[in-house]
Structures are given as C-alpha cells and as structure tokens.
Image (cartoon, rainbow, N blue to C red):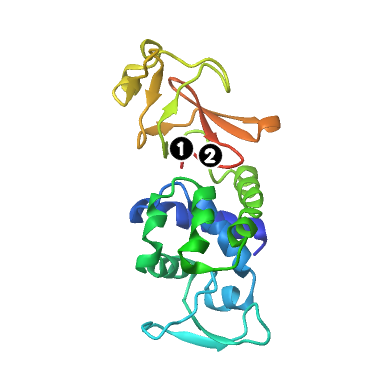
Amino acid sequence: MTKNEYINAMYVILSRKCIERGYHNVACGMIAQSIQEGWNSLLAKNYYNYWGMKASKDYKGKTVFMNNKSKTDPATYRTYISMEDGCDGYFKFLEYPRYKMLKTCLSDISYLDNIGPCGWNSNVGYGDRCKKHLNDVYNALMNNGVIYEIGRVYTLQSNMYIRKEPNGDKKELSEITDNAKKNSYADDNGFAILKKGTRVTCKEIVTVADKNQTWIRIPSGFICAMTKDKVYII
C-alpha cells in the first residue's frame, strides 16, 4: 500500500467514525499523527496498530512484544485484525479521561496542538512534527477525489457563508434557495450563513491553487470546503 492509498483508506474510515463518536473535523489530524507514529512500520503493517499504542496493565486485548521505532527499547503493543479494527482501537484509547478535551477541538491543527499535552507524547514539538504531515494528507485526498465528488452529499462542520463565486461576494439570505433558507440565518448585514450540520450536494468542485483552497458549488452558491489548515465539509 502506498502512502497515498493509506491516507485515502484511513480517511474513509476515520471521517465516519469521527462523526459517530463526537469528534469534529479532525480526521486528517488523526491521519497525520499516524504517519508521524510510523504508518508503514511492521507494527502497523502486521498488527494494524497505526499509532504505536502500547498495552497498559488494564488492557485485555491481544498484544505483541517487539521493537517499534526504538531499536533498543522493545515494548508490548496492542494488536488488531484489520485497519478498521485498528481505528476502533485508537478511539478506544482516546477514551482515557486525559484525552477528553480533544472532543472540543474543531480543527486538525487544534487537535494536533493538544494531543501531546494531553499525555500522548510529552516531548516538546510533538504536535508540530505531526502537523508537518498535514499537507501530504490534504494533497492525497484532493488528488484522489476521496473528499469531494460531484453528486455526493456532505456535511458542514462549521457555520459557512455562501458566496457568489470562490472568494467572492457573500450572498444575502434572499438570494439563496428556499431549501437552503430552512438551514440558514442572516448575519447583522443580511448575509446568509448556512448552519453547521447542514447536508449539501456538491454540484461543482473548484480548486484555488494559489490559496490552497477547495470550494464546492451547491444549489445556492459556493462554499469553502477545505483550506491548507482546515477541512470544513466532510
């Protein structure tokens, strides 16, 4: 499996599980962390443990004793039977109370800034090292069309302005479709804001390369789907 194939396969699983488990717009951050932890290591390839999760005394599942990233300090690691099982194991690991605040993170950047201090890795700069992989994640997803496809329905992860064109003028509430009005409200200037959680159908995909942005056209206009630092629609 190539790195791009890995990223796309993980995104399909993690984006769904994030919604199911109450995490908001952080699936790409989770993938970036797994790359930092050794996505292509023997532990990942043979035992589907993509985040290097060790087995504590309270862990009742299957384990393996091996070297992972360190060649001089072998440890006992959790093992899983498939990529999906490994992702479930990751979310189970995040149920430790020290990681509770991660559910309040609303972006990949925020998630990676906080997971180290929560207790995952106390080394200064851990989050920054993980964030270095985000561009690879975003580029792989955009290039392979996993995130956005014409005709597919997506969910807004935050409130969004509707624009006449990418980075163009905002649309007023009176200018959007009746269906969109049901899930929108007007700001103080009368501009339409589509509510977080609204499901939208992608009619067109526009990439603004110089700004590292991806926009999609919905029946009422254009909304920003993704930037270099954040994914707004999944």
Q: Amino acid at mark 2?
A: Tyr
Name the foreground residue: 17 vs 32: 32
Left or right of 141 on screen, residue 83: left
| Foreground of the two, 92 or 181 | 92
Image position, residue 36 (x, y; %): 62, 64
Q: Residue at x 46, y 63 (%)?
A: 118
User: Looking at the picture, how far across and down is residue 130, in whole percent?
Assistant: 61, 58
* Percent of width and height locating residue 20: 34, 54
Query: Which image quarter is the N terminus in?
Result: bottom right
Mark 1, secondary structure of its residue: loop
Q: Nearer the viewer, mark 2 or mark 1?
A: 2
Q: Which residue is mark 2?
A: 148
- Dot 1, how many residues are within 10 Å of its Cα: few (below 14), some (14-19), or many (20+)? few
Q: Is residue 28 visible?
A: yes
Question: Seen in the image, is 133 located left or right of residue 54?
Answer: right
Position of 189 with respect to 72 (left or right) is left
The Cα–Cα distance between marks 2 and 1, rounded to whole angstroms, is: 7 Å
Quarter occupied by residue 42: bottom right
Q: Are marks 2 and 1 in contact (CB under 8 Å)?
A: yes
Asked which secondary structure carries label 2, the reply is loop
Name the amino acid, label 1: Arg
Q: Which residue is mark 1?
A: 152
